[in-house]
Image: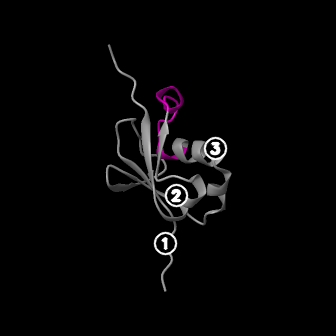
Amino acid sequence: MKLSVDMTVLLFGVTRDIVGTGSLKIPATAAKGLKTVEDLKTHLKKVYPGLKDLSSLAVAVNQSYAGDHDPIQNTDEIALIPPVSGG
């Protein structure tokens, strides 16, 4: 029997401010349809419309930057990386 695992997404900087927490749990039933980084970003922008206003939104999967077409799994360590500004 396969256990269903919720997907965890870590949030930093302005993404944390927009969502209101440092990490999200996406229920396994909802995460089942999220096969790629792009799927995840689309889902999160629907749930948290403020994310659409960001100039960029990078995603790291298992501590490596991932492209929109890279696959994701519920057991991956996923983090949203907001745009970085310097001074």
Alpha carbon separation for disc pair 1 and 2 = 13 Å
Q: Residue 74 location, x and y as percent?
A: 40, 35
Label placed on residue 16: 2
Furthest residue toward top? 1
Q: Are marks 2 and 3 in contact (CB under 8 Å)?
A: no
Q: Residue 64 location, x and y as percent?
A: 33, 56
Q: Horizontally, is 40 left or right of 53 in the view?
A: left
> As shown in the figure, which amino acid type bears the numbered disc 2?
Arg
Residue at 44%, 46% (x, y): give it.
Answer: 9
Label placed on residue 47: 3
Residue at 57%, 52% (x, y): give it.
Answer: 19
Q: Nearer the viewer, residue 59 or 4?
A: 4
Q: Which residues are magenta?
A: 27-38
Residue underneath mark 1? 84
Sequence-wise, which precedes: disc 2 or disc 3? 2
> As shown in the figure, which amino acid type bears the numbered disc 1?
Val
